[in-house]
Image (cartoon, helix red, strand yellow):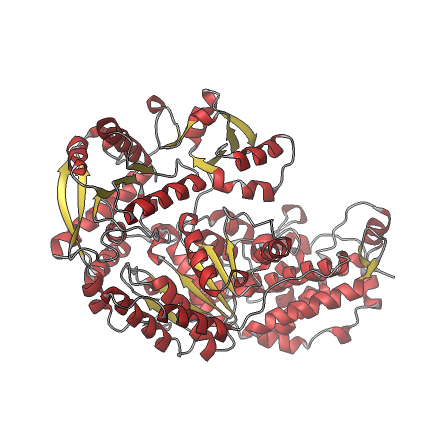
């Protein structure tokens, strides 16, 4: 008997059982986007290299490692060269990840797909004894399924095929994992959660109906909510929810999604995508409290699964692997890097994005230099994978300009201008240049005020000026020099002070702007892009407690507070400041939709393709398909995965001994209990620093290295409960938020 796996108790899984089990699962997953036969053939052939004597010796007698992933791709190419070149990526990479394509001159040593297809592998011909061609799905059916994957624009055929490869790869890797898991575990593992979306819709409608409607603002929020329900009855597609800050778009967009599933029953999942880990927790908590915790998966780098409830812990932890749960709350980084990644751990979940409603909250926060590949991915999900996309923001960047004209974006609220008129009870005043000392004096006469600056350096210096002048009572600092747990603690204290009408002066970087639910009577904002100014205005008079409130935009005159204009961040900031100044000259009220539209029109019109697709991701993928040579597909998946980083991974992580939990986990790391899960659980105690900052701390023996780009702050004394990690001023403080 040829075997695929062997358990610790000696039980063996027949290889044919594994191939058929994997093929059936992969076929089921791919049926959601009409590619069941394509995925089946990949599942059936993915492990036929295990029929070699070398592999059987490996598994039975702990023999040498041997290649078993190339064989299936070779067989498929011998049957049909085009299929082999296309689906060969899926089969060869099902353990290590999607490979670079290589080219006609590829050699087996270069690790590319074409190199692998030329590689000599152990004799696996014994597969013919068990895997008969009768098991194959009709090749004509596979050909039709592949041909049926079409882009809106002919020029995007390469991108379209590369996306399909990722989807089939996702089906295969998830199926392979799950079939193996079923055999290797002696006890049945509970995965996923089923739910009645109609029941959840009723729950959220009841929740909103119970809210206070005495105040006019809640009546207006109810109106937005009901518009979302009505629009949700339409077919899947691209939607925009342009709701001013304070309009209740979080709950309204979820209600839209739940009603949308009722009218489009093929839809099966809701994915809520948020720009920052700093605000994801509050949104996940809102959904969990209303709809039930078991239906909501919070998945991001800072999340630590609750181990107190073993069953819940297991289900949530396992669901994070492949997103087989009804409602996912995740980050831009997790979502888009799962699309453009190449490793099984990233791509395994991708097939479960099909037939989903994807809500992009604060869509304007997508990095400009990756906006084209992000837009293209959303277009492809709508076009070929039956997804609905909801773009949510008070400052819509008109993402559709980077999509085909054939995709129509529908506004959910019909009265956007009227909504802005109602909710906009904050006026923006540009007060020009001011010294830091004069700014500090202005804050002295205000009981509650939010001051947002552009850099961590500015935030720290201004906070120090404030407490030196007025003391620490009621004065707070927020920046990414503070670990996430610390920041969340400070934000909760700020919210309590605001509610109790106590003194509360906050100096923050832009991290507070998008999605942090705070309401100040006055806001000061250092000059920046109009989108950031509008988001800052959303932290002012949010609940309309005052008839009118003001956000004051200023420029520092002090040299020590100026941003270095020659730095990359300085260039980025200067461009946005200049466009904002032009828009402010043309519009009396810069918070109006027409002003915001003009801002983004100018921003994107002035940007080159390089500035909008920094690494030429879309161009490279389209060039992977040559119309003159339609049998060949040269997609450099490995390079693309390396290049596509929404947040550049050149930061250095410093773990803070913030509390007893952090100290215990750090001790386990130091004593050799090193694992990805352990590092993930420490993310909430981690501060990311630049190369220079990290090595400054190493030079003064403040940091102990634990691994590549990872260290621990040795003394808690080097971490302040007010400002976070202490970088000696004379050695430099970074100009980043």
Q: Residue at x 34, y 45 (%)?
A: 511
Q: Residue at x 56, y 60 (%)?
A: 323
Q: Residue at x 22, y 56 (%)?
A: 599
Task: Name above or below for residue 478 compared with residue 121.
Answer: above
Provide residue 699's location: percent of width, then percent of height.
Answer: 46, 21
Provide residue 439's location: percent of width, then percent of height.
Answer: 17, 36
On-image quarter of the C terminus: top left
Question: As drawn, is 43 to the left or to the right of 730?
Answer: right
Location of residue 390 by image quarter: bottom left
On-image quarter of the N terminus: bottom right
Provide residue 466's location: percent of width, then percent of height.
Answer: 24, 31
Question: As drawn, is 251 to the left or to the right of 602?
Answer: right
Task: Name above or below for residue 342 compared with residue 226.
Answer: above
Provide residue 346's location: percent of width, then percent of height.
Answer: 56, 54
For the question of whether residue 153 can be seen, the reply is no
For the question of whether residue 258 can be seen, the reply is yes
The answer to which of 212 and 346 lies nearer the viewer is 212
The answer to which of 220 and 184 lies nearer the viewer is 220
Q: How many marks?
A: 0
The answer to which of 396 and 541 lies nearer the viewer is 541
């Amino acid at each position: 008997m040829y075997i695929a796996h062997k358990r610790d108790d000696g039980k063996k899984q027949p290889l044919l059982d594994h191939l058929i089990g994997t093929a059936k699962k992969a076929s089921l997953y791919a049926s959601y986007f009409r590619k069941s036969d394509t995925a089946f053939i990949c599942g059936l052939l993915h492990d036929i290299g295990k029929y070699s004597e070398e592999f059987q010796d490996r598994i039975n007698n702990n023999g040498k490692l041997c290649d078993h992933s190339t064989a299936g791709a070779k067989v498929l190419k011998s049957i049909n060269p085009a299929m082999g070149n296309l689906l060969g990526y899926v089969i060869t990479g099902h353990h290590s990840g999607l490979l670079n394509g290589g080219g006609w001159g590829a050699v087996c040593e270069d690790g590319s797909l074409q190199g692998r297809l030329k590689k000599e592998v152990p004799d696996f011909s014994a597969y013919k004894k068990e895997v008969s061609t009768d098991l194959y799905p009709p090749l004509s059916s596979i050909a039709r399924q592949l041909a049926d994957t079409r882009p809106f624009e002919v020029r995007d055929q390469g991108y379209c095929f590369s996306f399909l490869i990722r989807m089939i790869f996702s089906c295969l890797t998830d199926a392979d994992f799950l079939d193996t898991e079923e055999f290797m575990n002696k006890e049945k593992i509970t995965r996923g959660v089923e739910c009645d979306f109609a029941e959840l819709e009723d729950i959220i409608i009841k929740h909103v109906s119970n809210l206070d409607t005495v105040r006019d603002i809640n009546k207006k929020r109810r109106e937005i909510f009901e518009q979302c329900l009505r629009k949700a009855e339409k077919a899947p597609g691209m939607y925009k929810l342009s709701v001013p800050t304070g309009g209740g778009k979080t709950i309204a967009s979820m209600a839209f999604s739940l009603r949308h599933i009722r009218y489009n029953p093929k839809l099966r999942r809701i994915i809520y995508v948020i720009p920052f880990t700093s605000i994801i927790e509050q949104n996940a908590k809102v959904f969990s409290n209303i709809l039930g915790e078991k239906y909501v998966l919070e998945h991001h780098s800072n999340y630590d699964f609750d181990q107190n409830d073993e069953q819940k812990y297991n289900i949530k932890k396992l669901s994070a692997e492949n997103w087989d749960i009804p409602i996912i709350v995740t980050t831009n980084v997790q979502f888009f890097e799962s699309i453009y990644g190449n490793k099984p751990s990233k791509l395994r979940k991708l097939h479960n994005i099909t037939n989903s409603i994807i809500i992009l909250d604060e869509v304007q926060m997508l990095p400009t230099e990756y906006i084209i590949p992000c837009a293209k991915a959303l277009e492809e999900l709508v076009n070929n994978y039956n997804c609905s996309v909801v773009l949510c923001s008070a400052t819509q960047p008109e993402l559709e300009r980077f999509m085909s004209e054939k995709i129509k974006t529908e506004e959910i609220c019909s009265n956007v201008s009227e909504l802005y008129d109602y909710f906009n009870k904050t006026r923006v005043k540009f007060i020009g240049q001011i010294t830091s000392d004069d700014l500090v004096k202005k804050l002295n006469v205000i009981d509650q005020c939010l001051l947002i600056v552009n850099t961590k350096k500015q935030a720290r210096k201004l906070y120090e000026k404030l407490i030196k002048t007025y003391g620490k009572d009621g004065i707070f600092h927020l920046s990414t020099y503070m670990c996430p747990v610390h920041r969340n603690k400070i934000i909760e204290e700020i919210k309590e002070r605001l509610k109790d009408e106590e003194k509360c002066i906050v100096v923050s970087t832009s991290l507070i702007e998008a999605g942090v639910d705070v309401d100040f009577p006055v806001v000061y904002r250092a000059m920046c892009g109009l989108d950031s100014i509008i988001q800052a205005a959303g932290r002012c008079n949010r609940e309309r407690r005052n008839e009118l409130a003001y956000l004051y935009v200023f420029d520092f005159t002090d040299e020590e507070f100026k941003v270095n204009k020659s730095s990359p961040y300085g260039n980025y900031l200067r461009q946005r400041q200049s466009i904002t100044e032009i828009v402010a000259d043309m519009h009396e009220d810069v918070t109006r939709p027409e002003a915001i539209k003009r801002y983004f029109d100018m921003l994107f019109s002035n940007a080159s393709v390089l500035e909008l697709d920094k690494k030429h991701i879309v161009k490279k993928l389209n060039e992977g398909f040559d119309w003159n040579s339609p049998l060949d597909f040269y997609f450099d998946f490995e390079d693309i995965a390396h290049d596509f980083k929404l947040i550049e991974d050149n930061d250095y992580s410093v773990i803070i001994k913030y509390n007893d939990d952090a100290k215990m986990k750090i001790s386990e790391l130091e004593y050799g209990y090193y694992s990805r899960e352990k590092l993930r659980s420490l993310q909430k105690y981690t501060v990311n620093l630049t190369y220079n900052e990290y090595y400054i701390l190493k030079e003064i023996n403040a940091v102990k290295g634990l691994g590549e780009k990872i260290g621990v702050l040795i003394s808690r004394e080097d971490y302040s409960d007010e400002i976070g990690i202490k970088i000696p001023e004379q050695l430099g403080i970074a100009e980043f938020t």
